[in-house]
Amino acid sequence: MARAHLSQVPQTVDVLIAGGGYVGLSLALAIKVGASDLSVAVVDLREPDVADKDGRASAIASAARTMMTTLGAWQGLEDQAQPINKMIITDSETRDPVRPVFLTFDGETKHGEPFAHMVPNGAMTKSMRARCQEEGVFIEAPQTVEDFQAHSGHVNIVLGDGRQVSSRLLVACDGVRSRLRDLAGIETVGWMYGQSGIVCTVSHERDHEGIAYEHFLPAGPFATLPLPGKRSSIVWTEKTATADALVNGDEFTFMLELERRFGAQFGELKLESRRVAYPLGLKLARSFIAPRLALAGDSAHGMHPIAGQGLNMGFRDTAALAEAVVDAARLGLDIGSVDVLERYQRWRRFDTAQMGVVTDVLNRLFSNDLTPVRMARSFGLGVVDRLPKLKSYFINEAAGIAKDRPRLMSGEAI
Protein backbone atom coordinates (compact mmCIF):
# COMPACT_ATOMS: atom_id res chain seq x y z
CA MET A 1 0.00 0.00 0.00
CA ALA A 2 1.36 3.43 -0.94
CA ARG A 3 2.28 5.87 1.79
CA ALA A 4 -0.09 8.74 2.52
CA HIS A 5 1.03 12.19 1.40
CA LEU A 6 -0.34 14.95 3.63
CA SER A 7 2.45 17.49 3.13
CA GLN A 8 3.08 20.07 0.43
CA VAL A 9 2.46 19.40 -3.24
CA PRO A 10 5.80 18.62 -4.92
CA GLN A 11 7.34 21.06 -7.37
CA THR A 12 6.56 18.80 -10.33
CA VAL A 13 3.48 16.55 -10.75
CA ASP A 14 1.74 14.89 -13.67
CA VAL A 15 -1.78 16.00 -12.70
CA LEU A 16 -2.83 18.78 -10.33
CA ILE A 17 -6.50 19.03 -9.36
CA ALA A 18 -7.87 22.27 -7.91
CA GLY A 19 -10.74 21.36 -5.59
CA GLY A 20 -10.96 18.60 -3.02
CA GLY A 21 -14.68 17.89 -3.15
CA TYR A 22 -16.28 14.66 -4.35
CA VAL A 23 -15.38 15.16 -8.01
CA GLY A 24 -11.81 16.29 -7.36
CA LEU A 25 -11.05 13.45 -4.95
CA SER A 26 -12.75 10.79 -7.08
CA LEU A 27 -10.82 11.96 -10.15
CA ALA A 28 -7.50 11.88 -8.29
CA LEU A 29 -8.28 8.38 -7.03
CA ALA A 30 -9.42 7.10 -10.43
CA ILE A 31 -6.30 8.35 -12.21
CA LYS A 32 -3.96 7.02 -9.53
CA VAL A 33 -5.63 3.59 -9.39
CA GLY A 34 -5.55 3.35 -13.20
CA ALA A 35 -1.96 4.59 -13.64
CA SER A 36 -0.02 4.26 -10.39
CA ASP A 37 3.15 5.70 -11.94
CA LEU A 38 1.47 9.08 -12.50
CA SER A 39 1.94 11.60 -9.70
CA VAL A 40 -1.37 13.21 -8.75
CA ALA A 41 -1.98 16.13 -6.38
CA VAL A 42 -5.10 17.81 -5.00
CA VAL A 43 -5.26 21.30 -3.51
CA ASP A 44 -8.38 22.47 -1.70
CA LEU A 45 -9.41 25.83 -0.32
CA ARG A 46 -11.05 24.33 2.78
CA GLU A 47 -9.58 22.81 5.90
CA PRO A 48 -10.14 19.02 5.69
CA ASP A 49 -12.45 18.86 8.71
CA VAL A 50 -14.86 21.38 7.16
CA ALA A 51 -15.96 18.88 4.51
CA ASP A 52 -16.10 16.11 7.12
CA LYS A 53 -18.68 18.11 9.10
CA ASP A 54 -21.02 18.59 6.12
CA GLY A 55 -24.39 17.43 7.48
CA ARG A 56 -26.06 17.09 4.08
CA ALA A 57 -26.62 13.91 2.07
CA SER A 58 -26.55 13.17 -1.65
CA ALA A 59 -28.24 10.69 -3.97
CA ILE A 60 -25.60 8.46 -5.56
CA ALA A 61 -26.80 6.81 -8.77
CA SER A 62 -26.18 3.13 -9.44
CA ALA A 63 -23.43 3.76 -12.00
CA ALA A 64 -21.61 6.15 -9.66
CA ARG A 65 -21.84 3.59 -6.86
CA THR A 66 -20.35 1.00 -9.21
CA MET A 67 -17.45 3.35 -9.96
CA MET A 68 -16.85 4.01 -6.26
CA THR A 69 -16.93 0.26 -5.54
CA THR A 70 -14.39 -0.40 -8.31
CA LEU A 71 -12.12 2.28 -6.80
CA GLY A 72 -12.49 0.84 -3.30
CA ALA A 73 -14.26 3.90 -1.86
CA TRP A 74 -17.78 2.47 -1.47
CA GLN A 75 -16.76 -0.24 0.97
CA GLY A 76 -16.25 2.37 3.71
CA LEU A 77 -19.71 3.83 3.05
CA GLU A 78 -21.96 0.82 2.64
CA ASP A 79 -23.15 0.69 6.23
CA GLN A 80 -24.09 4.38 6.09
CA ALA A 81 -25.90 4.28 2.74
CA GLN A 82 -29.68 4.09 2.44
CA PRO A 83 -31.00 2.42 -0.74
CA ILE A 84 -33.94 4.13 -2.42
CA ASN A 85 -36.47 1.31 -2.79
CA LYS A 86 -39.18 3.33 -4.51
CA MET A 87 -39.87 6.85 -5.73
CA ILE A 88 -43.36 8.38 -5.69
CA ILE A 89 -44.16 11.53 -7.67
CA THR A 90 -47.18 13.75 -7.01
CA ASP A 91 -48.42 16.97 -8.56
CA SER A 92 -50.57 19.23 -6.40
CA GLU A 93 -50.95 22.53 -4.61
CA THR A 94 -49.72 23.01 -1.04
CA ARG A 95 -53.26 23.42 0.27
CA ASP A 96 -54.57 20.20 -1.34
CA PRO A 97 -55.64 17.75 1.42
CA VAL A 98 -54.85 14.75 -0.82
CA ARG A 99 -51.92 14.53 -3.22
CA PRO A 100 -52.77 12.15 -6.04
CA VAL A 101 -49.92 9.87 -7.09
CA PHE A 102 -49.27 10.19 -10.81
CA LEU A 103 -46.05 8.22 -11.16
CA THR A 104 -44.15 5.61 -9.16
CA PHE A 105 -40.75 4.10 -9.81
CA ASP A 106 -39.67 0.87 -8.18
CA GLY A 107 -36.11 1.23 -6.99
CA GLU A 108 -34.42 -1.51 -8.98
CA THR A 109 -32.67 -1.14 -12.32
CA LYS A 110 -32.59 -3.89 -14.92
CA HIS A 111 -29.52 -5.22 -13.08
CA GLY A 112 -31.58 -5.82 -9.94
CA GLU A 113 -29.94 -3.18 -7.75
CA PRO A 114 -31.28 0.13 -6.34
CA PHE A 115 -31.08 2.93 -8.89
CA ALA A 116 -29.70 5.20 -6.15
CA HIS A 117 -28.49 5.34 -2.55
CA MET A 118 -28.57 8.27 -0.15
CA VAL A 119 -25.13 8.84 1.35
CA PRO A 120 -23.96 11.38 3.99
CA ASN A 121 -21.71 13.94 2.33
CA GLY A 122 -19.18 14.01 5.17
CA ALA A 123 -18.77 10.24 5.16
CA MET A 124 -18.35 10.19 1.38
CA THR A 125 -15.60 12.82 1.51
CA LYS A 126 -13.73 11.02 4.29
CA SER A 127 -13.88 7.68 2.49
CA MET A 128 -12.57 9.07 -0.79
CA ARG A 129 -9.84 11.11 0.91
CA ALA A 130 -8.69 8.04 2.83
CA ARG A 131 -8.48 6.01 -0.40
CA CYS A 132 -6.55 8.81 -2.11
CA GLN A 133 -4.02 8.82 0.72
CA GLU A 134 -3.70 5.04 0.55
CA GLU A 135 -2.90 5.25 -3.16
CA GLY A 136 -0.31 8.00 -2.72
CA VAL A 137 -2.20 11.08 -3.89
CA PHE A 138 -0.69 14.32 -2.55
CA ILE A 139 -3.34 16.38 -0.74
CA GLU A 140 -2.70 19.92 0.46
CA ALA A 141 -5.34 21.97 2.26
CA PRO A 142 -6.04 24.76 2.75
CA GLN A 143 -4.41 25.78 -0.51
CA THR A 144 -5.47 27.44 -3.77
CA VAL A 145 -4.39 27.88 -7.36
CA GLU A 146 -3.94 31.62 -7.88
CA ASP A 147 -2.77 31.61 -11.51
CA PHE A 148 -1.49 29.38 -14.27
CA GLN A 149 0.18 29.64 -17.65
CA ALA A 150 0.00 26.88 -20.26
CA HIS A 151 3.06 26.05 -22.33
CA SER A 152 3.72 23.51 -25.09
CA GLY A 153 4.68 20.64 -22.76
CA HIS A 154 3.48 21.71 -19.31
CA VAL A 155 1.43 24.20 -17.34
CA ASN A 156 3.08 26.47 -14.77
CA ILE A 157 0.87 26.85 -11.71
CA VAL A 158 1.14 29.51 -9.00
CA LEU A 159 -0.25 28.43 -5.62
CA GLY A 160 -1.79 30.70 -3.02
CA ASP A 161 1.40 30.85 -0.95
CA GLY A 162 3.46 31.88 -4.00
CA ARG A 163 5.03 28.49 -4.72
CA GLN A 164 5.19 27.38 -8.34
CA VAL A 165 4.33 23.90 -9.55
CA SER A 166 4.85 22.41 -12.99
CA SER A 167 2.23 19.91 -14.20
CA ARG A 168 1.29 18.22 -17.45
CA LEU A 169 -2.42 18.70 -16.75
CA LEU A 170 -4.43 21.04 -14.53
CA VAL A 171 -8.04 20.13 -13.70
CA ALA A 172 -10.52 22.68 -12.37
CA CYS A 173 -12.92 21.14 -9.83
CA ASP A 174 -13.34 24.43 -7.98
CA GLY A 175 -17.10 24.86 -8.19
CA VAL A 176 -19.77 26.63 -10.17
CA ARG A 177 -18.03 30.00 -9.68
CA SER A 178 -14.75 28.52 -10.88
CA ARG A 179 -11.80 30.89 -10.68
CA LEU A 180 -9.73 28.71 -13.03
CA ARG A 181 -12.47 28.70 -15.65
CA ASP A 182 -12.47 32.51 -15.55
CA LEU A 183 -8.68 32.70 -15.71
CA ALA A 184 -8.77 30.48 -18.82
CA GLY A 185 -11.26 32.86 -20.45
CA ILE A 186 -13.91 30.16 -20.84
CA GLU A 187 -17.35 31.72 -21.09
CA THR A 188 -20.55 30.23 -19.73
CA VAL A 189 -24.18 30.27 -20.80
CA GLY A 190 -27.05 30.17 -18.34
CA TRP A 191 -29.45 32.05 -16.12
CA MET A 192 -30.81 32.17 -12.59
CA TYR A 193 -34.29 30.87 -11.80
CA GLY A 194 -35.20 33.25 -8.99
CA GLN A 195 -35.46 30.11 -6.85
CA SER A 196 -33.39 28.73 -3.99
CA GLY A 197 -33.06 25.17 -2.77
CA ILE A 198 -33.53 24.71 0.98
CA VAL A 199 -31.62 21.72 2.32
CA CYS A 200 -31.94 20.16 5.77
CA THR A 201 -32.31 16.83 7.58
CA VAL A 202 -35.32 15.83 9.68
CA SER A 203 -36.20 12.87 11.88
CA HIS A 204 -39.72 11.42 12.06
CA GLU A 205 -41.76 8.95 14.11
CA ARG A 206 -42.47 6.35 11.44
CA ASP A 207 -40.15 4.49 9.09
CA HIS A 208 -39.84 5.78 5.52
CA GLU A 209 -39.29 2.19 4.22
CA GLY A 210 -36.71 3.50 1.78
CA ILE A 211 -39.30 5.47 -0.21
CA ALA A 212 -38.43 8.83 -1.75
CA TYR A 213 -41.15 11.36 -2.53
CA GLU A 214 -41.06 14.25 -4.96
CA HIS A 215 -44.02 16.61 -4.73
CA PHE A 216 -44.33 19.07 -7.59
CA LEU A 217 -45.72 22.20 -5.98
CA PRO A 218 -46.35 25.61 -7.60
CA ALA A 219 -43.13 27.15 -6.22
CA GLY A 220 -41.01 24.16 -7.27
CA PRO A 221 -40.31 20.55 -6.31
CA PHE A 222 -40.29 19.41 -2.70
CA ALA A 223 -38.37 16.14 -2.22
CA THR A 224 -38.03 13.89 0.82
CA LEU A 225 -35.17 11.45 0.45
CA PRO A 226 -34.70 8.51 2.86
CA LEU A 227 -31.68 8.33 5.17
CA PRO A 228 -30.62 5.50 7.50
CA GLY A 229 -32.96 5.26 10.48
CA LYS A 230 -36.14 7.28 10.76
CA ARG A 231 -34.60 10.28 9.03
CA SER A 232 -35.01 12.06 5.70
CA SER A 233 -33.08 14.62 3.70
CA ILE A 234 -35.20 17.55 2.46
CA VAL A 235 -34.57 19.35 -0.84
CA TRP A 236 -37.16 22.12 -0.98
CA THR A 237 -37.42 24.62 -3.84
CA GLU A 238 -38.96 28.04 -3.18
CA LYS A 239 -38.78 31.52 -4.61
CA THR A 240 -35.56 33.07 -3.35
CA ALA A 241 -37.19 35.70 -1.13
CA THR A 242 -39.41 33.06 0.51
CA ALA A 243 -36.49 30.66 0.97
CA ASP A 244 -34.35 33.36 2.60
CA ALA A 245 -37.18 34.26 4.97
CA LEU A 246 -37.71 30.61 5.93
CA VAL A 247 -34.02 29.90 6.51
CA ASN A 248 -33.34 33.09 8.45
CA GLY A 249 -36.61 33.14 10.40
CA ASP A 250 -37.56 31.32 13.57
CA GLU A 251 -37.58 27.54 13.67
CA PHE A 252 -41.25 27.33 14.70
CA THR A 253 -42.45 29.04 11.49
CA PHE A 254 -40.02 26.99 9.40
CA MET A 255 -41.33 23.72 10.84
CA LEU A 256 -44.95 24.75 10.29
CA GLU A 257 -44.26 25.39 6.60
CA LEU A 258 -42.22 22.21 6.35
CA GLU A 259 -45.01 20.11 7.83
CA ARG A 260 -47.52 21.60 5.37
CA ARG A 261 -45.41 20.29 2.51
CA PHE A 262 -44.10 17.10 4.11
CA GLY A 263 -47.48 15.79 5.17
CA ALA A 264 -48.37 13.65 8.19
CA GLN A 265 -47.57 10.18 6.84
CA PHE A 266 -44.39 9.87 8.96
CA GLY A 267 -45.74 11.47 12.16
CA GLU A 268 -44.02 14.20 14.15
CA LEU A 269 -41.01 15.88 12.54
CA LYS A 270 -37.89 17.22 14.23
CA LEU A 271 -35.19 19.35 12.62
CA GLU A 272 -31.80 17.60 12.88
CA SER A 273 -29.52 19.96 10.97
CA ARG A 274 -29.15 23.63 10.22
CA ARG A 275 -31.23 25.11 7.43
CA VAL A 276 -29.30 26.19 4.34
CA ALA A 277 -30.56 27.81 1.11
CA TYR A 278 -28.68 27.79 -2.21
CA PRO A 279 -29.62 29.95 -5.24
CA LEU A 280 -30.59 27.82 -8.23
CA GLY A 281 -29.75 28.37 -11.87
CA LEU A 282 -28.36 26.81 -15.02
CA LYS A 283 -24.73 27.39 -15.96
CA LEU A 284 -22.90 25.49 -18.69
CA ALA A 285 -19.33 26.15 -19.77
CA ARG A 286 -19.03 26.82 -23.51
CA SER A 287 -15.92 24.64 -23.53
CA PHE A 288 -14.82 21.96 -21.07
CA ILE A 289 -11.17 22.36 -22.01
CA ALA A 290 -8.42 24.89 -22.67
CA PRO A 291 -4.69 24.33 -23.30
CA ARG A 292 -3.49 21.97 -20.52
CA LEU A 293 -6.74 22.52 -18.61
CA ALA A 294 -9.91 20.46 -18.15
CA LEU A 295 -13.09 21.44 -16.30
CA ALA A 296 -15.01 18.81 -14.31
CA GLY A 297 -18.02 18.81 -12.02
CA ASP A 298 -19.66 22.11 -11.12
CA SER A 299 -16.83 24.03 -12.81
CA ALA A 300 -18.19 22.71 -16.11
CA HIS A 301 -21.91 22.61 -15.32
CA GLY A 302 -24.39 23.68 -12.69
CA MET A 303 -28.05 22.73 -12.99
CA HIS A 304 -31.34 22.53 -11.11
CA PRO A 305 -31.60 19.63 -8.62
CA ILE A 306 -35.07 18.67 -9.93
CA ALA A 307 -33.68 15.45 -11.47
CA GLY A 308 -31.09 14.81 -8.75
CA GLN A 309 -28.30 14.49 -11.31
CA GLY A 310 -25.87 17.32 -10.50
CA LEU A 311 -23.36 15.31 -8.46
CA ASN A 312 -23.79 12.24 -10.64
CA MET A 313 -22.97 14.26 -13.75
CA GLY A 314 -19.75 15.23 -11.97
CA PHE A 315 -18.95 11.58 -11.31
CA ARG A 316 -19.51 10.86 -15.02
CA ASP A 317 -16.91 13.58 -15.72
CA THR A 318 -14.54 11.80 -13.36
CA ALA A 319 -14.94 8.44 -15.10
CA ALA A 320 -14.57 9.90 -18.61
CA LEU A 321 -11.57 12.15 -17.88
CA ALA A 322 -9.77 9.46 -15.88
CA GLU A 323 -10.22 6.97 -18.71
CA ALA A 324 -8.91 9.44 -21.31
CA VAL A 325 -5.86 10.28 -19.16
CA VAL A 326 -5.04 6.70 -18.15
CA ASP A 327 -5.43 5.36 -21.70
CA ALA A 328 -3.07 8.09 -22.95
CA ALA A 329 -0.52 7.36 -20.23
CA ARG A 330 -0.62 3.64 -21.01
CA LEU A 331 0.18 4.40 -24.66
CA GLY A 332 3.00 6.76 -23.74
CA LEU A 333 1.12 9.83 -24.99
CA ASP A 334 1.07 13.32 -23.53
CA ILE A 335 -1.78 13.25 -20.98
CA GLY A 336 -2.36 17.00 -21.28
CA SER A 337 -2.39 17.17 -25.07
CA VAL A 338 -5.24 18.59 -27.12
CA ASP A 339 -6.16 15.14 -28.48
CA VAL A 340 -6.61 13.66 -25.00
CA LEU A 341 -8.65 16.62 -23.75
CA GLU A 342 -10.78 16.65 -26.89
CA ARG A 343 -11.66 13.00 -26.30
CA TYR A 344 -12.93 13.92 -22.84
CA GLN A 345 -14.88 16.91 -24.15
CA ARG A 346 -16.57 14.92 -26.92
CA TRP A 347 -17.59 12.32 -24.36
CA ARG A 348 -19.12 14.70 -21.85
CA ARG A 349 -20.27 17.90 -23.53
CA PHE A 350 -23.39 16.62 -25.32
CA ASP A 351 -24.56 14.56 -22.34
CA THR A 352 -24.16 17.58 -20.07
CA ALA A 353 -25.97 19.96 -22.42
CA GLN A 354 -28.78 17.43 -22.83
CA MET A 355 -29.22 17.08 -19.05
CA GLY A 356 -29.10 20.86 -18.65
CA VAL A 357 -31.96 21.25 -21.14
CA VAL A 358 -33.96 18.47 -19.44
CA THR A 359 -33.66 20.01 -15.98
CA ASP A 360 -34.47 23.47 -17.33
CA VAL A 361 -37.60 22.27 -19.11
CA LEU A 362 -38.74 20.18 -16.13
CA ASN A 363 -38.32 23.10 -13.77
CA ARG A 364 -40.25 25.49 -16.01
CA LEU A 365 -42.96 22.90 -16.59
CA PHE A 366 -43.47 21.89 -12.96
CA SER A 367 -42.86 25.24 -11.23
CA ASN A 368 -46.06 26.48 -12.82
CA ASP A 369 -49.60 26.67 -11.47
CA LEU A 370 -51.47 27.40 -14.70
CA THR A 371 -54.41 24.98 -14.92
CA PRO A 372 -53.86 23.88 -18.56
CA VAL A 373 -50.18 23.22 -17.84
CA ARG A 374 -51.02 21.24 -14.70
CA MET A 375 -53.54 19.14 -16.60
CA ALA A 376 -51.09 18.42 -19.41
CA ARG A 377 -48.23 17.40 -17.14
CA SER A 378 -50.49 15.24 -14.95
CA PHE A 379 -51.69 13.47 -18.09
CA GLY A 380 -48.08 12.98 -19.19
CA LEU A 381 -47.04 11.52 -15.83
CA GLY A 382 -50.00 9.15 -15.96
CA VAL A 383 -49.03 7.95 -19.43
CA VAL A 384 -45.46 7.23 -18.32
CA ASP A 385 -46.76 5.34 -15.28
CA ARG A 386 -48.71 2.99 -17.58
CA LEU A 387 -45.80 2.16 -19.91
CA PRO A 388 -43.35 -0.23 -18.20
CA LYS A 389 -40.70 -0.01 -20.91
CA LEU A 390 -40.68 3.79 -20.78
CA LYS A 391 -40.49 3.72 -16.98
CA SER A 392 -37.58 1.30 -17.18
CA TYR A 393 -35.82 3.65 -19.61
CA PHE A 394 -36.18 6.60 -17.21
CA ILE A 395 -34.96 4.51 -14.25
CA ASN A 396 -31.86 3.39 -16.13
CA GLU A 397 -31.16 6.95 -17.28
CA ALA A 398 -31.42 8.18 -13.68
CA ALA A 399 -29.14 5.34 -12.59
CA GLY A 400 -26.52 6.40 -15.16
CA ILE A 401 -26.73 3.11 -17.05
CA ALA A 402 -26.05 4.14 -20.65
CA LYS A 403 -24.48 2.20 -23.50
CA ASP A 404 -21.54 4.59 -23.93
CA ARG A 405 -20.71 5.00 -20.23
CA PRO A 406 -17.03 4.95 -19.19
CA ARG A 407 -15.55 1.65 -18.05
CA LEU A 408 -15.44 2.57 -14.37
CA MET A 409 -19.21 3.02 -14.38
CA SER A 410 -19.58 -0.51 -15.70
CA GLY A 411 -17.40 -1.91 -12.93
CA GLU A 412 -14.35 -2.34 -15.19
CA ALA A 413 -10.87 -1.20 -14.27
CA ILE A 414 -9.16 1.34 -16.55
Image (tube, rainbow, N blue to C red):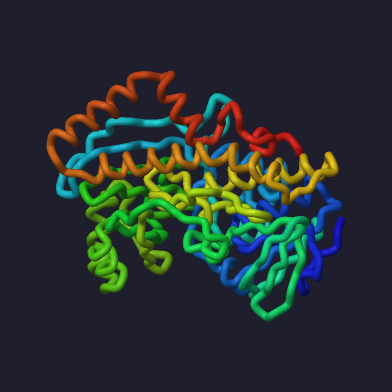
- Residue at 55%, 52% in the rendered image: 297
Residue 206, percent from left and from top = 38, 49
Q: How far across and how far down the image is residue 204, in percent? A: 37, 55
- Left-right relation of 405 to 206: right
Visible in this render: residue 232? no
User: Which residue in the rendered view is the most extreme toward the front?
Assistant: 152
Q: Residue furthest left?
A: 371
Position of 122 with respect to 127 (left or right) is left
Figure quadrant of residue 291: bottom right
Quarter of the picture holding the N terminus = bottom right
Do we see residue 44 in this rendering?
A: yes
Residue at 32% over, 37% down? 89
**Figure disc tally:** 0
Corner quadrant of residue 39: bottom right
Instruction: Please state, as top left, top right, bottom left or bottom right, where the C terminus lies in the image.
Output: top right
- What residue is at 86 percent from the left and 58 percent from the top? 2
Between 324 and 152, the one nearer to me in the picture? 152
Residue 325 locus on image (x, y percent): 73, 45
In the rendered image, the vertical position of residue 407 relative to residue 36, given as above or below: above
Q: Is residue 90 above or below residue 45?
A: above
Residue lying at 30% horizontally and 54% vertically, measured from the top left: 193
Observer-nearest of 197 and 36? 36
286 to the left or right of 259: right
Is 155 situated above or below 356? Answer: below
Given residues 117 and 47, the one toward you in this image is 47
- Nearer to me, 402 or 265: 402
